[in-house]
Amino acid sequence: MTASAAPRVLADVGHRHREQLRVDRLLVLGGIAAVGIGFMLFWQLGMGYIVNQRYISTPVEVAVSLFERIGSGDLPRHITATMIAAGGGWVVGIAVGLSGAFLLLMTRRGYEVLEPFLLAFYSIPKIALAPLFIMWFGLALTPKLLLAALMVFFIVFMNTVAGVRAVDRGLVDVARVLGAGRLALIRKVLIPAAAPSIMAAIRVTFARAMVGAILAEFIASREGLGYMIVRAARQFDIATVFAGVVVIAALVMLVNAAIRTVEARLFPWASGTVEA
Amino acid sequence: MTAVEEPIRLAGSPAAEGPSAAVLLDEQGRHRAQSRAHRRFLFVARLASLVGFLVVWELASGTIVRPFFISSPTAVAGALVEWVESGDLWYHGQFTLLATFLGYVSGSLSAIAIAWPLGLMPRAYRIAEPYFLVAYSVPAVAMGPVFILWFGLGLTPKVVLAAYFVFFIVFVNTVTGFQQVPRGMLDVTRVLGASRVALLRTVILPSALPYILAALRITLPAAMIGAVVGEFIASNRGLGYLTRAAAAEYSTAGVIAGVVVMSAIVLAMTLLLRPLGHALRWQQEVKVNRGTV
């Protein structure tokens, strides 16, 4: 009796549990959809009664502005400009941050000596340098790219240094005893061990590169999403401002998803968290 | 293990006699002297690199590089002294600090107020999560023009922007804190008959607090960056305005002086709030999500 009943009871429980999970998932998905649709409807129909419509636009107007600007080729041009500045700055910042960190770590006491200065430089609000860069390099690509690179540089630099310094001393000692030279030590021990924190830094810094590029465009530039938003704001064209914000958010999310995919393919073991 | 522990106990007790204690004390003294020498070396080396940097900067300016690009330490110091004497520094600084403070308080309070209930209601949080993730990936900077459009050129848009810079970081970390509460402990406390309030006070808050405090510690500088960004985009007072006005006059020394002032404030804030990280000794370091400011 028990021998035949137990499996059935278990199957029953399992079935009920799966059913419960399904209901739960449906509830959450339904909730997400309801909140989204409710918010859009309220924004479209109801918010005008609370605040002046001119200040908040409507979802339809934002969508119209988005498609008009895609159609006129305006938006693709601005997206390209911002992405070149942010992407270029990102790559430059990563390259300089990595090589700078390893150069410093090659010296015996360099890091210890420079530590307080690095912390001081770290506390410079990088955004505050935007006016300086624009003064130096004008309105073209250079100041945007450099500001994006600077936003990236310190995070990559600090995470690489922290990752390498956290490497197990035992591994380093064993590698040395086994006769590894400096380069072999870096290539075979330090880089693999520090890879998780380096990868994490690389992943989170793209959004920062975007911030750098967009802020430079806010202050002074002739093209790019930041420029488009500021110009629309001056003309009180709030629909275009929101369209720009939507595009920026979409770009950041897209690139983040792409980086995650590439990262999972290339370094399945290195999914660390960042100590920014 | 015992072989290592034994001599240490001997060295520590005054009654200890024999060679092993003396050798260890000697070793200890040598170690201390070495670390004193090391500290002295670090101090000298750091001082030397600071002085060297300033001297090279001063000498290079006007000879190798045009002063327009890098100014010089004396010119920057001159600009700072001028700001102090004319009262500009204090006049503009107070608006930035006020916007920073108001934004910090309102941003973190509203974040905690929203994250608290959401962190305790898993299903509601899962419904809200995608929307917060989308809003989170909008670089806070991008909202600057929107807030200025909504709230004008006065203090309000800077406060709102500062609050916005703070909000998501505190929100994300508060939710994480509430989600980190060990389930087993919750269940045990419930079985033992704890009321909701007791549960909150004895289990939930102690394990969530480190995350909240860590977020509060790192977001004060973020609030100031928010206020400064607001001042960059449109304003007629504040440190951001002061810096941008210097840039408009092509005064490199003024811009660098502005950056120095802001960095000093950020550094002071970081040092000031550092004790907050050590306030809760029962918890080890928590991984704090810093966002993209």
Image (cartoon, rainbow, N blue to C red):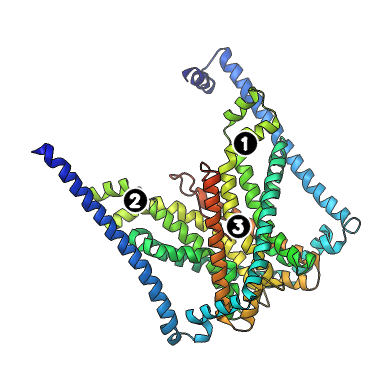
Looking at the rendered structure, the secondary structure element under dot 2 is: helix
Residue under disc 3 on the same chain as residue under disc 2? no
Q: Which of marks 3 and 1 is nearer the N terminus?
A: 1
For disc 3, the chain is A
Q: Nearer the viewer, mark 3 or mark 2?
A: 3
Q: Label 3 sits on what residue type?
A: Phe
Residue identified by numbered label 3? A206
Q: Answer yes or no: do the residues labelled 3 and 1 have beta carbons within 8 Å?
A: no
| Separation of marks 2 and 1 at Cα, in angstroms | 40 Å
Q: Label 2 sits on what residue type?
A: Val
Residue B225 in percent (x, y) is at: 62, 64
Q: Which residue is drawn at 20% across and 46% down?
A: A11
Residue at the outermost front position: A71
For disc 1, the chain is A
Residue B115 appears in the picture as rendered = yes
Q: Find residue A21 and report its image quarter.
A: bottom left
Side of B163 where B116 appears, left or right: left
The circle drawn on residue A174 is none
Side of B52 where A89 appears, left or right: left
Residue A274 in percent (x, y) is at: 55, 49
In this orientation, which residue lies closer to the viewer: A154 or B6?
A: A154
Residue identified by numbered label 1? A190
Looking at the rendered structure, the secondary structure element under dot 3 is: helix
Up the image or down, A69 lies above or below A116; here it is below
Q: Residue at x 40, y 71 (%)?
A: A36
In this orientation, which residue lies closer to the viewer: A125 or B1?
A: A125
